[in-house]
Image (cartoon, helix red, strand yellow):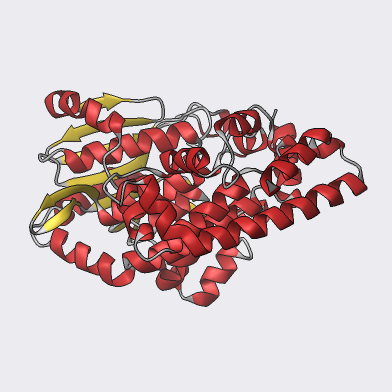
Amino acid sequence: MAAQRVDDLLDELPLPPARTSAQRDTASSALDKIRAMRADYVEAHAEDIYDELTAGRTQYLRVDELVRAAASAYPGLVPTDEQMAAERSRPQAEKEGREIDQGIFLRGILRAPKAGPHLLDAMLRPSPNALRLLGEFAESGVVEMEAVRLERRDGVAYLTLCRDDCLNAEDVQQVDDMETAVDLALLDPSVRVGMVRGGEMTHPRYRGRRVFCAGINLKKLSSGDIPLVDFLLRRELGYIHKIVRGVFTGGSWHSRFIDKPWLAAVDSFAIGGGAQLLLVFDHVLAASDAYISLPAAKEGIIPGASNYRLTRFTGPRVARQVILGGRQIRADEPDARLIVDEVVPPEEMDAAIESALARLGADAVLANRRMINLAEEPPEQFGRYMAEFALQQSLRIYGADVIGKVGRFAAGSA
């Protein structure tokens, strides 16, 4: 079997950083050939593969469950559990890049006309953790998690990002907690509006100040702890898409989703993933001393779905300046109003938040934001973008430039 021969070859070689130039060329050539075969196979058989893995689309498998099922049912198509466990034990620079094969597989599935939409729906279903906590939240109105504090007051679900030691830099834990919190806010019938804001920091540079989000945790990326499936794809297809589309429940005759209006309040800065988040909210409020940036090109990765969403907010020129050139936008400059709805002095944030929440709670807001989102972000277009993102981001996180940059960042911040 071709895939087994490539695996045997890789097993005989040293880890990637220790390989000679000739060994790197040999590995690269073998991987290119087997990956071309995998891409062709998935492209030709995506619907049949997906039907088999989901019992004819009667079962909803999340992306992590889907790749594991594919590894068992189609040996050599995607990495095995054992291969992925070995990858997880290594820093990014020492991995073989087997997540690229997951990216190839998921691109093919998300491109497929029937399988792709079904997988998107699977990722919009309530998470098991949220279903477990729903009764507790409905009764107490509070859920404390490691990265997010969720509190319900007067029909508003307040989601506070509380990773105070790392300026709310994103990692797997934050994605897990955010999805749980978003699900709970959507599933609780007494919640009318959701809001996300950063909490007060203990980090020396921002002690006592609120911070929205510092973007992806580059130290975790360097150490190999930012996975493609459980972070980069789960984040986009999970809680962020749920803010746009709602949580999928099968629902009633008038809607299969439960969706609600959302507000974001930006204190200090929204960097990287924090800036990406702003593009899915119905109302964005920022303190006048805050700023927004998407340094993904500088880091070498793709800024989630920002390449899909930002242009419709800012136009193509500003979007390219921000994404390709790393332009930082201050809240008090004119272009910020293309992304932010309101800018107020820091001391007026609380009052402005309450006023904005009251407006979002109006009866007609929900139906209208649903129609706006449908017009601006049709699910089939989003699915096509995410199909290519699955592959291109998997390639980027193993790029030599990315590994070098995050390695230097991790060493400098140690």
Q: Nearer the viewer, residue 336 or 260?
A: 260
Check the image and report above or below for 206 versus 255.
above
Q: Nearer the viewer, residue 355 or 166?
A: 166
Total numbered badges shown on the rendered structure: 0
The residue that appears at 66% across and 60% down in the rendered structure is 36
Could you tell me residue 412's position as x and y percent?
74, 34
Left or right: residue 160 versus residue 168 is left
Could you tell me residue 41's position as x and y percent?
56, 59
Quarter placement of the C terminus: top right
Left or right: residue 59 versus residue 273 is left
Could you tell me residue 292's position as x and y percent?
49, 55
Q: Nearer the viewer, residue 128 or 333?
A: 128
Could you tell me residue 217's position as x and y percent?
57, 38
The residue that appears at 24% across and 68% down in the rendered structure is 372
- Is any atom of residue 345 visible in this view? no
The residue that appears at 38% across and 43% down in the rendered structure is 62
The residue that appears at 31% across and 45% down in the rendered structure is 60
Check the image and report above or below for 72 versus 288.
above
Left or right: residue 70 versus residue 359 is right
Check the image and report above or below for 252 versus 140.
below
- Is any atom of residue 59 visible in this view? yes
